[in-house]
Amino acid sequence: MCEQERVHIVFVCLGNICRSPLAEGIANALYTQAPNTPSLEFSSAGTSGFHNGDPIDARSIAIARENGIDIAHYTSKQVSPYTHSDVDLFVAMDRSNLAALKAMGFESHKIVLLGDFGLGGAEVPDPYYGGADGFKKVYAMLQNGIADLLGRFKR
């Protein structure tokens, strides 16, 4: 992947209101601190349209803000073969989203589980129905997994 001029990475969760927009924000923040990394572009989307066009969950915004990242302007969007045909890598938060991406017809070699990057294969749990502690745990997992993922792109 590193031979390309730009690599487009999309983080994917179910509704694109908690995990994947937080992952996008973390990736952008870590990327600005990553020397010797090729041109990377990050975005996020959900496999469902439950929240399409909705603002990001306030708890994701809060944990991001606590860590110096602003994702307040993000809005939820659904992944689609029509709007995501230029994607080089889909990074799924859990195995259900991984399977959904494959069922949508995306090429298997372009789909990975974030948990396979420094997280021992763990799924990033959906914190939606939990409290602030769940969002803190998810933030830490995302930060570790994304740091490992970005490390794979260094020249």
Image: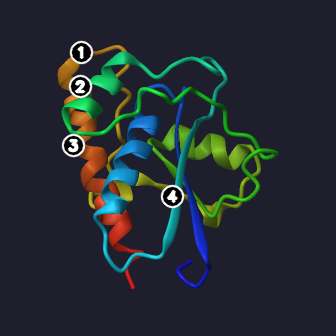
Residue named by callout 1: 131
Q: Earlier in the sequence, mark 1 or mark 3?
A: 1
The Cα–Cα distance between marks 1 and 4, rounded to whole angstroms, is 27 Å
Number of the label disc, if any, that sits on residue 134: 2
Quarter of the picture containing the N terminus is bottom right
Q: Residues within 10 Å of mark 1 (few under 14, many from 20)?
A: few
The Cα–Cα distance between marks 4 and 2, rounded to whole angstroms, is 23 Å
Locate residue 13 relative to residue 30 in the image: left or right.
Answer: right
The Cα–Cα distance between marks 1 and 3, rounded to whole angstroms, is 15 Å
Q: Residue at x 38, y 74 (%)?
A: 152
Q: Earlier in the sequence, mark 3 or mark 2?
A: 2
Residue type, label 4: Val
Q: Are marks 1 and 2 in contact (CB under 8 Å)?
A: yes
Percent of width and height locating residue 149: 37, 64
The Cα–Cα distance between marks 1 and 2, rounded to whole angstroms, is 6 Å
Number of the label disc, if any, that sits on residue 112: 4
Q: Secondary structure at mark 1?
A: loop
Task: Report which quarter residue 155 is drawn in.
Answer: bottom left
Residue type, label 2: Gly
